[in-house]
Image (cartoon, rainbow, N blue to C red):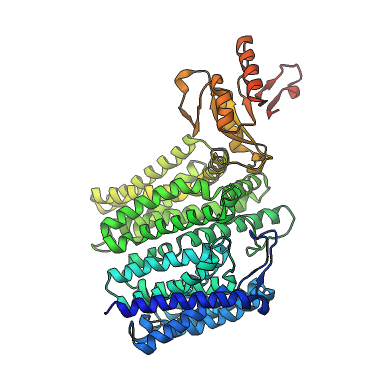
Amino acid sequence: MILMEPLLMLAGTFVVSLGATRLMIWLGPKLGLMDQPDARRVHQTAIPRAGGLAVWVTFLLAMLVSAWSGVGGAGGGLPGTVAFCLSSVILVLVGVVDDRRGVPALVKLACQMAAAAVYWWLKPGGSGNLFGLEVPWFVDLGCWIVWIVLLINAFNLIDGLDGLCGGLAAISLTCMVALEVSQGHWGHALGLGLMVASIGGFLVYNRNPARIFLGDTGSMVLGLFLASMASDVVGRKTLLGSVLLPVAVAGVPLIDVVLAIWRRSVRSVLSQWGGNGAVGIFAPDKDHLHHRLLARGWSQRKATRVLHGLAILVSVIALLPTLMGSTGVLLAALSAFVIALLGLRHLASVEFIQSGNLIHLAVKRRTNEWRRRLIYFLHDAGGLVLGCAAALIVDSNFGHRSFLLSQPWTLTLVFTGTGLAMLLGLKIYRRVWNRARLREFMLVAGGLMLAAAAAGTLIDVSAGDLTWRMQRVCLMAGFFSTVMVLLPRSLPEVLRELAVDSIHRQKHRVPRSVKRVVVYGAGDLGNLYLDYLASIPPDHFEQFQVLGFLDDKKELRARLIRGFEVMGSLEDLPRLGRELRLDGIILAIGRLDDVRLGRLQSALADSNLILHRWSCGLQGPSEDPSSGQFQCDVA
């Protein structure tokens, strides 16, 4: 009987949501809340976007009934009900105007910040308490505004496919309900479940092909609800749980919004450097996660199911530490690493291309040399200080035992001075790092480790005692500082490699203008072609997509050359042409004898493929040195 009343509440909320959504399908056109198709939209006909109003009104009614009947406790079981209801009014008002005729981005952002501030003012627990830590009120306010506005815009940006945004919100809330039930907080679970039921009735009519959309009103209200309730209800468990909370609550939308900020920021800089003016970070585009899945030829339903599945996986991983303790931390870390390793190449291809273009342009762009050196010098000094500080903190077991020295800043000053002297001696600021090789990175790393050992020895000698603890701390400081110093210098090459990886090693169908090819010849010329791919602007990749190698050496079959597979020999070309839908091959062999040339021509004729020749060499010799040219081209 105890469970019967909550279940009846949930069922009744779902039925009311069905009716309210059906009413909004009829009322939306009369209110002018219609989503017209355009270049960025997926749908082809005008569809009402008043579903958010149905979800909001249904939830408010459900909370009133719950509070009046006493089911779930006072306030319907949620401590921030009043704060949410009042702050959501601001978003509903601006959302309705935006859905009807549009609102400038800055005005909408200001209203979102106002709603976040209202919630912070009225939220339970008072101010100055952030995830159980005492902080100044203005820090608490700033964090709340950033967190709430971030989630509001994350769900607003991801709302692009039938059932996607509402489904992601329902998945996040269901995970929160499960967590509350596991903790025995039945009242909180019921309050969250009422929102799930409100969304469920809407999703019945939002499935593909959708008859109604959430609109900006609904996506913003859902973002506010998830941000506020997750923090006030679920985020009070542990500090670790609160750190992982954003990932658990809105993993997929947050990934999408981070990629959007990255992508649009880089595009803005590229546009300014190209003399075309800045591109606003709020400028819309068609490169969101769901757009990329659709570009692969996936249906709306398939793309939505995949993103929903990813959301469930990310939520479960992020909640493992809260549910399983230290074992869950290890499992979550390993799972997150695997997902990041496998997912980046598929999720961030556009961002890698844009970043590669920016780096390529930055290398060629004339800059003030002394200013560049000064920025690097200041960065390195900061990296040495942070590396030494991190080593001292780790050595003290994060404050659980005394520091190595009574005045820790002594080691920091000595190590920083020694490290900077070593960097200057290695001429680190005169090197062209975008052309650097492994030897140069190892030279800097070894120099910093020697500087760390020298700093520790110097302090120990001055104190009259050589200790292993001092050397251990200095070695840790050298390691941390090496990472800090070399990271910005190695990042451009990493991004270039990721740009090559994300474009060429994906087997999905690319635009028709891009030719799908394999490289015939895994020797020196083939490797030089890979170097060429890593050095040209990524937007030049629009000519070819390299899927792998062919080589007649049997022992190379199935081997990987810098990530590209040797798929077979020339005899396998007809089969690979059908399986991979190839358009041609790139010949990366200097000379072919008559027999191999005849086999190549026959294979090309059988497969109806086009031959492109890659050449790289010196043309000459000649008495005039200026006539000796180095050429690299694909013809």
Q: How many marks?
A: 0
x, y percentage for residue 295? Answer: 61, 49
Q: Residue at x 59, y 41 (%)?
A: 509
Can residue 621 be seen in the rendering of this structure?
A: yes
x, y percentage for residue 310? Answer: 44, 55
Instruction: Give the image quarter of residue 95.
Output: bottom right
Image position of 131 with respect to 535: above or below: below
Q: Residue at x 75, y 22 (%)?
A: 627
* Quadrant housing the C terminus: top right
x, y percentage for residue 89? Answer: 54, 83
* Quadrant housing the N terminus: bottom left
Tell which of 38 and 407 is nearer to you: 38
Q: Residue at x 63, y 44 (%)?
A: 360
x, y percentage for residue 218? Answer: 55, 73
Tell which of 35 and 4 is nearer to you: 4
Q: Residue at x 64, y 31 (%)?
A: 583
Residue 114 left/right relative to 46: left
Can residue 404 be seen in the rendering of this structure?
A: no
Residue 513 left/right relative to 411: right
Image position of 421 with respect to 187: above or below: above
Tell which of 581 and 212 is nearer to you: 212
Q: Work out which residue is located at the far bottom of the displayed protein and give it.
A: 68
Residue 81 left/right relative to 593: left
